[in-house]
Image (tube, helix red, strand yellow):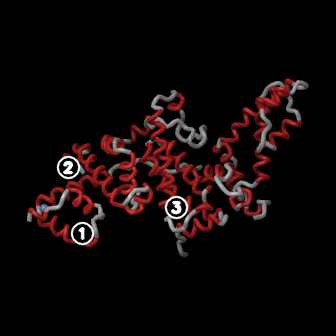
Amino acid sequence: MKKHCLDREEIFLLTQGMAGEREAAGMMAHVESCADCRKVFESYRRLDDVLAQWNPPAEPSPWFDARVRTAAASRPQARGSSGFLGLALNRWLALPVLASLLVVVGLIALRRTPRVTPPAHAVQSTAAVHVPAPPAQAVKAPAAPQTGAQEVNMYKNLSVLEDYDMLAGFDVISELPKGSSKVAD
Amino acid sequence: MAIDSDLELMLRVSRGDADSFGVLLNRHRGPLLSYFVRMVRDRALAEDLAQEAFLRVYQARERYQPEARFTTWLYRIATNLALNAIRDRKSDPVLPETAMAEPDGDGSASLLERAADGRPTAEEQMAESDRQRLIREAIETLPEKQRAAVILHKYQDVDYRQIASILKVSESAVKSLLFRAYESLRVRLEPLLEGGLV
Ligand SMILES: [Zn+2]
């Protein structure tokens, strides 16, 4: 029988169900009748059993979906003209909710800045944060240097908006009712 | 109630159906996360990458080609992300201590920005038995394509023809990758194979 012995790769493929369909039955018959080939065959089976014992814990966190949705809604589409606003995904994160969220976040940021009252225009630009004015511009404004510095701080604090967990933490995003989206498809 | 195929769901997503995207997310996030955990080890990074993979699926929904299986597409995106993360880690092995101190999954770093040092936390080390550690280390020493092929084949139950498509190699190349990987693993895991403690 020795001349019909299989090479290691053939035996390996047989153990993995990757041998050719036509050949598999004949190969298996040989393995069953040949001690040498069977030894190799069983060694791959044992290796498979050992590998099967590697089971690292991989439970998705409770906020997994919320983070994906928030990121999907806040990042522009890779290609194509119809951004997220034209799609049903904004049911999860409608624009009005986002806008009011931004105001809330902006106010929190301002409250953290001591000794100053937020000027009205600063709050307004927070709401329109989609295209924030470059901070340098605010610094250069000679008439209101303090306000400028304030605004710089505010924009710095706004980096918090990129934190998906922070946004996802607002229940209103995940619990938005169906009818709340104002953007027609 | 009939269970919708991934393909049907993805076609609906491409037409703007967010609910179908939720179904896909629910169906595949578990397997995808375990793929990343085995590929990059670091639990928090794995979750970031799994989220990033779904995000890319969503962003590319209009380009989805129905002739490709959804999981092939998903795992191709995932494999690229995982291999890039592994390469980044290799090219930047020294990382600030703050990255180590960051609690698991607190999300203070945005997607993909988290330091990927891959060292297990104390908790992870406790949970991992010597046996598990040996297997993990053996697989981690494999060249990257062999590693991805073994994990897809052995743990994700992905058909070798699909693996060929995911890794963009021929089917015979996948067979060869897996054979070479198993030969290396057989040598590295000899202590476990000999002990008969399987
Ligand atoms: Zn033989």
Is label 1 in contact with label 2 (beta carbons under 8 Å)?
no
The alpha-carbon separation of the residues under discs 2 and 3 comes to 37 Å
Other-residue count near label 3 (Cα within 10 Å), few / some / many at <14 / 14–19 / ≥20:
few
> The disc labelled 1 sits on which kind of residue?
Ala
Do the dots labelled 2 and 3 sit on one chain?
Answer: yes
Residue B185 or residue B24, whichever sits in front: B185
Query: Percent from the top left, x then y, of residue B150?
Result: 35, 52
Q: Which quadrant of the rendered structure holds the C terminus of chain A?
A: bottom right
Left/right placement of residue A64 relative to residue A179 reads: left
Residue plotted at (57% across, 50% down)? A64
Question: Residue B27 shows which numbered tag?
Answer: 3
Output the chain of dot 1. Answer: A
Residue at numbered disc 2: B196
Residue plotted at (53% across, 72% down)? B3
Residue at numbered disc 1: A24
Residue plotted at (60% across, 61% down)? B63
Q: Is residue A183 above or below residue A126?
A: below
* Residue furthest right in the image: A143
Picture quadrant of residue B122: top left
> The disc labelled 3 sits on which kind of residue?
Arg
Q: Does the rendering let one see residue B132? A: no
Q: Of marks 2 and 3, which one's residue comes earlier in the chain?
A: 3
Mark 1 element type: helix
Do the dots labelled 1 and 2 sit on one chain?
Answer: no
Left/right placement of residue B187 relative to residue B97 reads: left
Query: Percent from the top left, x then y, of residue A44?
Result: 23, 55
